[in-house]
Image: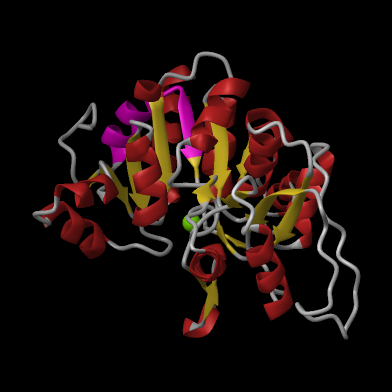
């Protein structure tokens, strides 16, 4: 989809162009990791930009595939890192949206087997979605363990306590064709400092897809469902008036394209300009969905736009 202020494809924008773009948008969708912060360190200027967006009347929402903390903990993190005006209702994490999907779309009647972290279970429980309680038994194996009789969905997310037994149980539950197979997201990996990486939910989903011979329904980006959650909770969400800002082409930009939003890549995270240009120049038209409309070095590039707005209003 062509951007309102330029042609589709990696347009590097700054200063007045950013201000014009911002004026044309009512909703700003922001990814978190790699855009606003790296771990516990905020991207320089990010908090000022987000606070200014909110104070200038923009609807700012956060769309994150990171399912490792419940929304309340996100609010604490935002506050801790200087994002002082962020409310719970603005946060759309893949764990929260998974809970909404199970409760409101599927209207699940039985239990959910979670292959994921504690935060994911917390979100489900807060939404009233029952999860299988796992007993700690070091001697349990797939040959002798109990399986719950009423599991109607398997949900995979980030799981740093992943075991072979959990994978085996999940595979057994998925033998039932009426048992749903969901993934919070399919991010392959996440960057850590020092060149190390953390395998993402996508790597665990792939393992379970192979063992079950089934394909997971993906809740998080690049699936459209998160945008449907936003549209159902805010009035007047018009895709033409939304801007999706993220750092990863295969999730954030594709999500924006899937939802027909203008997209912006920041270069403070995973993807770089050359990656975007490779997709843009590809002969495969499906690759064009990964191409951002706009590129900025950092979310901090929005700062001058607010200086000018504030000067004009004085
Ligand atoms: Mg990111």
**Do we see residue 70 in this rendering?**
yes
The number of numbered badges drawn on the structure is 0
Residue shown at 15%/47% (left/top)? 285
Residue shown at 45%/33% (left/top)? 306
Residue 23 lies in the magenta-colored region = yes
Residue 143 lies in the magenta-colored region = no
Residue shown at 48%/54% (left/top)? 35
Asked where in the image residue 147 lies, by quadrant, the reply is bottom right
Q: Which residues are magenta?
A: 15-29
| Above or below: residue 134 compared with residue 130 | below
Q: Is residue 271 left or right of residue 103?
A: left
Closer to the camera in the image, 272 or 13: 272
| Above or below: residue 267 compared with residue 58 | below
Q: Is residue 16 left or right of residue 85?
A: left
Q: Is residue 222 left or right of residue 1?
A: right
| Residue 288 rendering spot, x and y as whole percentages | 20, 47
Q: Chief secondary structure of the magenta span?
A: helix
């Amino acid at each position: 989809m062509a951007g309102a202020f330029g042609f589709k494809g990696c347009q590097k924008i700054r200063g007045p162009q950013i201000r014009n773009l911002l004026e044309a948008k009512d909703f700003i969708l922001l990814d978190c990791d790699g855009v606003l912060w790296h771990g516990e360190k905020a991207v320089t200027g990010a908090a000022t930009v987000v606070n200014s967006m909110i104070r200038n009347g923009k609807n700012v929402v956060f769309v994150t595939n990171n399912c490792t903390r419940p929304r309340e903990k996100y609010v604490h993190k935002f506050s801790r890192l200087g994002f002082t005006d962020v409310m719970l209702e603005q946060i759309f994490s893949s764990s929260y949206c998974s809970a909404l999907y199970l409760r409101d779309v599927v209207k699940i009647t039985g239990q959910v087997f979670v292959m994921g972290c504690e935060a994911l279970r917390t979100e489900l429980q807060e939404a009233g979605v029952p999860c299988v309680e796992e007993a700690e038994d070091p001697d349990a194996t797939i040959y002798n363990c109990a399986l719950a009789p009423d599991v109607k969905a398997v949900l995979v997310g980030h799981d740093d306590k992943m075991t072979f037994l959990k994978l085996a149980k999940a595979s057994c539950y998925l033998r039932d064709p009426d048992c749903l197979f969901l993934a919070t997201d399919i991010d392959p990996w996440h960057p850590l400092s020092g060149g190390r990486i953390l395998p993402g939910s996508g790597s665990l989903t792939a393992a379970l897809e192979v063992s079950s011979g089934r394909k997971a329904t993906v809740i998080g980006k690049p699936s459209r469902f998160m945008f449907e959650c936003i549209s159902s909770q805010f009035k007047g969400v018009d895709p033409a008036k939304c801007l999706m800002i993220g750092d990863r082409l295969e999730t954030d930009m594709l999500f924006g394209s899937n939802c027909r939003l203008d997209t912006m890549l920041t270069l403070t995270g995973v993807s770089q300009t050359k990656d975007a240009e490779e997709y843009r120049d590809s002969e495969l038209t499906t690759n064009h969905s990964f191409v951002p409309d706009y590129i900025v070095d950092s979310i901090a590039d929005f700062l001058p736009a607010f200086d000018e707005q504030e000067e004009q209003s004085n």
